Amino acid sequence: MNCELTQRYVSGYLDGELDLVRTIEMESHLKGCPTCAQELDTLKGLRAALQRSALVYPAPSAFRERIQTSLRASSRVDVQERKLRWPSVNIWQLAGAFALLALISITGWRLTARLRAPSGEQQIAAEVFASHVRSLEANHLMDVASTDQHTVKPWFDGKLDFSPPVEDLASDGFPLVGGRLDYLEGREVAALVYQRRKHFINVFVWPGSAETNSTPAIQPRQGYNIMRWSRGGFQFWAVSDVAASDLAEFVHMLQAGAPPQAK
Amino acid sequence: MLETVRRERFEQTVLPHLDAAYNLARWLTRNEQDAQDVTQEALLRAFRFFDGYQGGNVRAWLLTIVRNTCYTWIQRNRRGDRTELFDEEIHSMSFAGGADPEAQVLAGADRESLRRALEDLPDVFREALVLREMEGMSYKEIADVTSVSLGTVMSRLARARTQLRESLCVSLGKEP
């Protein structure tokens, strides 16, 4: 790869979006070319400035309420409109619609047969997901707010029958912001809260029966991503609305930390 | 009755992404009041189309609607000042590889200069940066929301960053 090509692809490289071949070519070029390496540094500086500057505009709370009110009003109007329109439907259209509906239901029923019998795993995934959404909605993200792992870890003492492993990943771009108690699968679990830009990552930890360490697998759910793995006698579930690649990176960092010890 | 269930489902699924929707609208309209109006209109449209939502990435689905609503609004309210699309093939990139530690200058840029430089970018560049740097979206997601190819996303982001740098260097009194 020459300097001209590097110039074209360096931004994609910064985003980790190049294919493997180009990534390798880019890396070998960057090693030998100080000008292009400096170009990459400049882009990193720009990104750092953007992320440090709190440029995200959150929705004002009065506006949030206005949205909910207007949704309610709109759903009432819809009902009225549907009632008014009803008599104008012709009988054949109605018959056709019923036939189509029946077809869709049968197909849908078959397609979702596997999904309707949730395994234990999916049950937990659903609980983890619900817990995450609730923690953000109910303004109950943290019981102990601290960026210090040596504050968060002792806080769980006496509240749980185990001591969860707590890692701070601030230097990797995922600062620990706190922890709280949560309730999953019929037991108390530790929830550790990390931040990625303005997004939060909930990591749920509890002792698992599985002796073996399992590698993480990612599953998307309504715009969120969930990852689970087990390690050192603990079960871990991470959930967030960050991009799948970010979450995978986060889990990778978490695993690279000191191996957790069960009490 | 059914309508209530449908609304509750919408509120649970879509409203958690209200902040993302508002932020995108805020950056595209560059005005708080307009952003609120556009976001509200987009959410009501999303609610109407909700039966057509097939599952999958709800944030990308919502932001696509927000973006389209924004562009309709922009066309209605602005006359071509900054809405014209850039011809990315013709505008070739300039290489700013001087020997100066530009990285340090940029890393030290204050919020106000950044905000102004970002607001001055053409809409398609600004939205790409907002989706990437603030929403942390992948190129695939950005491509879906903005209905362009992955290659276009990559080139828009590259051009957006180059322009942002140039305009920051000018405002911070440093030759690019």
Image: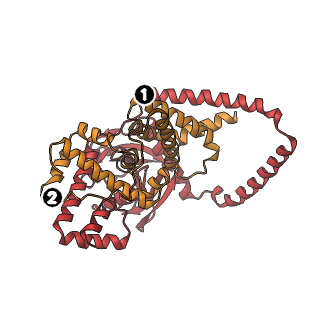
What residue sits right under mark 1 in the picture? B33
Q: Amino acid at mark 1?
A: Gln
The picture quadrant where one finds residue A260 is: bottom left
Residue under mark 2: which chain is it in?
B
In this view, A162 is above or below A143: below
Residue, x 35% and y 74% (percent of image)?
A21
| Disc 2 residue crowd, few under 14, some 14–19, many 20+, Cα 10 Å | few
Residue A48 in percent (x, y) is at: 25, 49
Chain A, which colour?
Answer: red
Asked whether, in this view, residue A38 is left or right of residue B52, the answer is left
Residue, x 64% and y 38% (percent of image)?
B6
Q: Which mark is residue A24?
A: none
Q: Which mark is residue B98?
A: 2
**Which residue occupies the foreground of this view, B14 or A81?**
A81
Residue under mark 1: which chain is it in?
B
The picture quadrant where one finds residue A259 is: bottom left
Residue A18 in percent (x, y) is at: 36, 66
Residue A218 in percent (x, y) is at: 46, 60
Mark 2 vs 1, N-terminal side? 1
Query: Dots 2 and 1: beta carbons under 8 Å?
Result: no
Asked whether, in this view, residue A66 is left or right of residue A48, the answer is right
The picture quadrant where one finds residue B47 is: top right
Q: Chain in orange?
A: B
Q: Are marks 2 and 1 on the same chain?
A: yes
